[in-house]
């Protein structure tokens, strides 16, 4: 029998491991893209969809994923999420065509959209208030460590075994997670009304964002002035406008628009969006640059990206402590400033085609990441009332995933149009500098809990 004291740590372990797999899948694919592109007879743009099909589904469904736990119960939800993720990870490894890999990746993203918010909710339901900080710290550290190890693991598997194992490796771990969770979880008696799912908001958001991303990704190939691309932009604008209108009127919105009237809340979410945008630039396009321009194999490219990932878990602790001591504003500004400097220098450095010149810029970016994410997350949660913490966390997760999918779309389009990695890094650096100015203006100097 599992006693209550052990049960919460078991729940923490399986929730953190599930979250870690999602974070791993965000970075493990990057170094494998050129090999997968060759084996599956895909062009460069199609290979980028291997990442963005996954991210796009997460972005569209993550806001509703958390609410489903209160509707159908967290035991059913979490097990369903991990099994969907695991089964379609397994299926992705058997892909023989671009359609196969993109479809399975999208369905894998559906599982991730359930796991992401559900795993956070499990910790809130399991741990008392005085232990939640410690639990979230462990949870975040495991996720960061998995994300940091992605390029190295992906490079090793692709180079020495097969890229298919970057997907197959998930399945046995998922089965273990599902079995242990099934044994350990006890559904809490919350005695609260079951929330309604904002179906109109979900449909309009998914159609709006999907149309926007598709237009940006395919614009260079189909022609920016083509009827199809213009039509997609019009559809995106129409459905996102409808989403905004619906969210203002519905009783239980998918995303509570009124929260964005708070400058700290809005600017902090923009910082999280930007942090994820920069991660796509460095990890995905950095891996492509190392292989396509510097002619590294996948394993060497994974090793070469270690300087960017190594500081993240360490800096996360320091950034958290600094936020507790000084508030979120200064740490966020430091993170944005370092990221802007790193990416601008990276853009200047790639023209030399010398990896050693890239190492300092990768280290600076790796240091900057934690100083953007952790303090901004604290600022978001402290800027809303206690009863809106769940809604705020859902918006944060949505902003993070949107940063990745919009970042990949925009940077893919730029690379396809201008054919130089310099534009990828310089554009990201300039965007980060713009967000630094916005955060300087709108982020409050003190962000105490409401």
Image: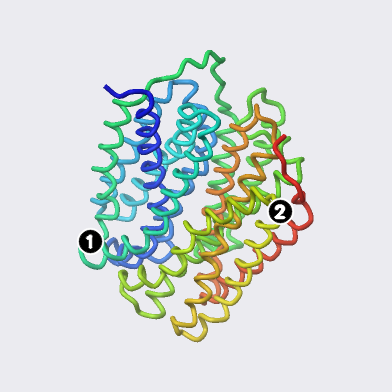
Q: Which mark is residue 329?
A: 2
Q: Which of 326 and 146 is in front in this view?
A: 326
389 vs 180, left or right, is right
View extreme (top): residue: 191
Q: Where is residue 172 in the image (x, y as percent from the top left)?
A: 23, 43
Whether residue 215 is visible: no
Q: Position of residue 22 (x, y in %)?
A: 40, 47
Q: Is mark 1 on a helix, strand or loop?
A: loop
Residue for point 54% across, 64% down: 367
Residue for point 25% across, 68% down: 159
Q: Which of 375 and 347 is in front in this view?
A: 375
Q: Is mark 2 on a helix, strand or loop?
A: helix
Disc 1 crowd rating (10 Å Cα; few below 14, some 14-19, many 20+) is some
Q: Where is residue 217 in the image (x, y as percent from the top left)?
A: 52, 59
Q: Nearer the viewer, residue 124 or 222?
A: 124
Residue for point 48% across, 30% down: 127
> Who comes first in sequence, dot 1 or dot 2?
1
Q: Where is residue 419 in the image (x, y as percent from the top left)?
A: 51, 76
Disc 2 crowd rating (10 Å Cα; few below 14, some 14-19, many 20+) is many
267 vs 302, left or right, is right
- Mark 1 and mark 2: span between their CA atoms? 45 Å
Q: Residue 162 carries which label?
A: 1
Q: Which mark is residue 276?
A: none
126 vs 90, left or right, is right
């Amino acid at each position: 029998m599992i006693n209550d004291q052990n049960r919460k740590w078991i729940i923490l372990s399986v929730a953190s491991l599930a979250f870690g797999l999602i974070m791993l899948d965000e970075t493990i694919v990057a170094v494998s893209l050129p090999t997968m592109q060759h084996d599956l007879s895909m062009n460069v743009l199609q290979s980028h969809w291997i990442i963005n099909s996954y991210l796009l589904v997460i972005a569209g469904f993550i806001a509703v994923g958390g609410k489903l736990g209160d509707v159908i119960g967290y035991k059913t939800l979490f097990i369903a999420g991990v099994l969907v993720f695991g089964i379609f990870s397994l299926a992705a490894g058997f892909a023989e065509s671009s359609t196969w890999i993109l479809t399975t990746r999208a369905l894998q993203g559906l599982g991730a959209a359930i796991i992401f918010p559900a795993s956070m909710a499990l910790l809130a339901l399991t741990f008392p208030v005085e232990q939640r900080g410690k639990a979230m710290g462990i949870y975040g550290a495991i996720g960061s460590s998995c994300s940091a190890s992605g390029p190295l693991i992906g490079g090793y598997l692709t180079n020495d075994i097969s890229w298919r194992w970057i997907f197959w490796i998930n399945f046995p771990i998922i089965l273990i997670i599902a079995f242990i969770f099934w044994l350990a979880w006890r559904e809490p008696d919350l005695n609260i009304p079951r929330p309604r799912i904002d179906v109109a908001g979900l449909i309009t958001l998914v159609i709006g964002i999907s149309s926007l991303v598709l237009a940006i990704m395919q614009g260079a190939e189909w022609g920016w002035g083509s009827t199809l691309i213009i039509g997609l932009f019009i559809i995106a604008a129409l459905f996102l406008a409808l989403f905004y209108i619906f969210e203002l009127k519905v009783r239980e919105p998918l995303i509570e628009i009124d929260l964005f009237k708070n400058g700290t809340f809005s600017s902090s979410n923009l910082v999280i969006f930007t942090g994820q945008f920069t991660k796509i630039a460095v990890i995905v396009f950095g891996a492509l640059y190392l292989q396509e321009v510097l002619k590294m194999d996948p394993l060497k490219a994974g090793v070469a990206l270690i300087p960017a990932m190594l500081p993240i878990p360490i800096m996360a602790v320091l950034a958290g402590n600094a936020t507790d001591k000084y508030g979120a504003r200064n740490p966020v500004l430091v993170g944005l400033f370092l990221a802007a400097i790193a990416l601008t220098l990276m853009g200047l450095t790639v023209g030399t085609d010398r990896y050693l010149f890239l190492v300092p810029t990768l280290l600076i970016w790796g240091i900057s990441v934690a100083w953007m994410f952790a303090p901004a997350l604290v600022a978001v949660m402290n800027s809303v009332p206690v009863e809106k913490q769940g809604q705020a966390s859902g918006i944060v997760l949505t902003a993070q995933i949107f940063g990745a999918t919009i970042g990949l779309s925009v940077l893919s389009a730029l690379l396809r149009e201008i054919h130089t990695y310099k534009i990828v890094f310089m554009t990201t650096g300039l965007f980060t500098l713009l967000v630094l100015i916005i955060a300087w203006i709108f982020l409050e100097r003190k962000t105490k809990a409401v």
